[in-house]
């Protein structure tokens, strides 16, 4: 067995163990990945490109930006700090826009309520008011 393959096997093992230790012990934390998956499924039911966009953003764009910022610190610490703060500001601005009603520009409130009622009916639950 080659040491490189064993090292990668350990990386995967510890990644999974750490994921379990983060998400499983606290009961409300268990619901976060499930709710996130349901939310992605909800948007994918309205927009067919959501899964592709998610994969491109999460596995190409975000790692690329983080790598670029980390390399920028090697060239200039001040530049790295400025770009890091700018990136945090962009993410915070998007989150603020989203929670202040921007999400209704993607899928309307009526469509959200209709889908929630459908989901509740499928699960045999009473719809949320």
Image (tube, rainbow, N blue to C red):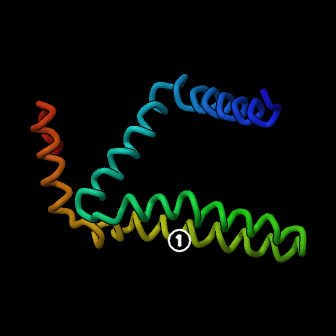
Q: Indicate whether 10 appears above or below 37.
A: above
Q: Is residue 82 left or right of residue 16?
A: right
The residue positioned 46% from the left and 25% from the top of the image is: 27
Q: Indicate whether 79 appears above or below 24.
A: below
* Quarter of the rendering occupied by the N terminus: top right
Q: Position of residue 10 (x, y in %)?
A: 72, 29
Foreground pick, 74 / 60? 60
Q: Quarter of the image holding residue 92?
A: bottom right
Binning the other alpha carbons within 10 Å of mark 1 as few (below 14), some (14 to 19) or many (20 upward) gives: few
The residue positioned 53% from the left and 71% from the top of the image is: 93
Q: Position of residue 31 (x, y in %)?
A: 41, 34
The residue positioned 18% from the left and 48% from the top of the image is: 116
Q: Is residue 73 left or right of residue 107?
A: right
Which residue is label 1 attached to? Answer: 93
Foreground pick, 37 / 110? 37
Q: Is residue 41 left or right of residue 85?
A: left
Q: Quarter of the image holding residue 120?
A: top left
Return the residue found at the far front: 1
The residue positioned 16% from the left and 52% from the top of the image is: 115
Return the residue found at the far top: 25
Q: Quarter of the image holding residue 65?
A: bottom right
Total marks in image: 1
Q: What is the secondary structure assignment of the residue under circle 1?
A: helix
Q: Position of residue 30 (x, y in %)?
A: 45, 30
């Amino acid at each position: 067995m080659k040491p490189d393959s064993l090292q990668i096997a350990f990386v995967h093992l510890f990644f999974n163990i750490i994921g379990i230790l983060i998400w499983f012990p606290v009961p409300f934390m268990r619901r976060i990945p499930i709710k996130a998956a349901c939310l992605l499924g909800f948007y994918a039911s309205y927009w067919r490109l959501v899964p592709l966009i998610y994969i491109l953003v999460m596995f190409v764009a975000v790692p690329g930006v983080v790598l670029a910022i980390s390399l920028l610190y090697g060239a200039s610490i001040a530049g790295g700090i400025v770009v890091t703060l700018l990136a945090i500001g962009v993410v915070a601005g998007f989150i603020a826009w989203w929670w202040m009603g921007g999400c209704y520009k993607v899928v309307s409130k009526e469509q959200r309520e209709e889908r929630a009622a459908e989901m509740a009916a499928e699960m045999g639950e009473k719809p949320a008011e």
